Amino acid sequence: MDFGFSGRAEDISTRYKYRRLSDHNAIRVIELLPECDGEEIHIHLHEVTLQEAPAYQALSYEWGETKGSHSIRYDSSILLVTTNLLAALRRLRFSTLRRYLWVDAICINQEDIEEKTQQVAMMGQIYKFGHKALVWLGEAGPGTTKAMSRFMEDVNGEFWQGLYDLFSRTYFQRLWIIQEVVLSPTADILCGGDRCSWSIFSAAAHYLRACLKLPCDQILNIILQISDMKGDLSYKYPDIMHLGYEHDEAGVWVSEALGHLKAAELKLRRSLTFLLITFSRSKARDPTDRIVALLSLTNKTSQRLLKPDYSLGAGHAYQ
């Protein structure tokens, strides 16, 4: 599929040159311009603090290639992005409205090791302060549109065509997605032009794991572990959730009960050792990321003691 303008940079002088962030608490936020501004993807970058940032959504996605080869526009300059990110940006772009996003490959100067180290340490806060995480699984495959639409109707229905495709996406093998989804207030699953909530997606994963033996069981387990850590326990207690939705008076009790369950489950999952064992099969390109990607999920003591530094070798990344 052709996602639109994808030319290579003809002249390196047209590449966007990042300015150093002016404050250690600052981040960059993307302003994604609407389709009416042209066929090419056009953006602006804004330096803001987390407290002053506009309502942005954080993209959780799979890089694919290690380096970008497709061009997007920032005024008269270009930035290079990967094929998968270009597809996501085209799907996320509104027709007439501007949209604010946080995307690691664009918002962090990947060539500046000092900035990368500092920004990666803030990623937990970046996802917490965001309005929502957008989980991009890639373009639709055979049957995935039908599968996603059936999520909305009845997660306990028949075995939907396309489920195996959705639950086999390599996105779910990434180690970084754990904190990206867990720390975000809410998350939506996007596949092509289709969308559903993380709660519905995890409920479908729970149903499949309980009722069917699938080759993608490992991914189903990861999805449910993320839901547990996120405190989204509705997939475990569908009867309680149904009671809460049907009876307003019971809603308060349901919220309090799930709140206590959430606190108890999260306490068990704050240990770095637990996280390293639980997600030992998840993939990260840089060995340093095996700890960095999970650090924001641990207790404050662990976060104080472990300080990542990408300028050092993997064997000496923590002081």
Image (spheres, rainbow, N blue to C red):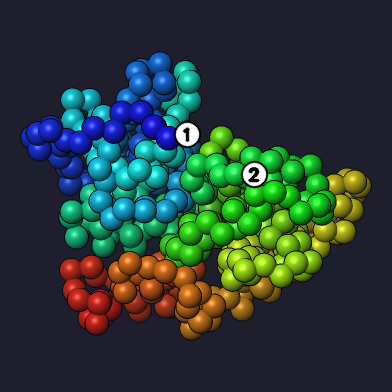
Query: Going by the picture, which residue comes out furthest to the top?
Result: 36
Marking on residue 143:
2
Q: Position of residue 96 (x, y in %)?
A: 47, 18
The residue at the point 18 percent across, 25 percent down is: 76
Quadrant in the picture for residue 88: top left
Q: Quadrant of residue 53?
A: top left
Q: Amino acid at mark 1?
A: Leu
State the SS at label 1.
helix
Residue with the most extreme front position:
142
Asked if residue 260 can be seen in this view, the reply is no
Q: Is residue 42 above or below residue 47?
A: above
- Relative side of 249 to 167, left or right: right
Q: Which mark is residue 73?
A: none
Q: Quadrant of residue 236?
A: bottom right
The N terminus lies in quadrant = top left
**Front-most of 178 and 296?**
178
Tell me what residue is drawn at x 61 percent, y 78 percent.
Answer: 268
Q: Amino acid at mark 2?
A: Gly
Return the residue at label 1.
Answer: 92
Marks 2 and 1 in Cβ contact (< 8 Å)? no
Quadrant occupied by the C terminus? bottom left
> How far across and how far down the image is residue 167, in percent?
60, 58
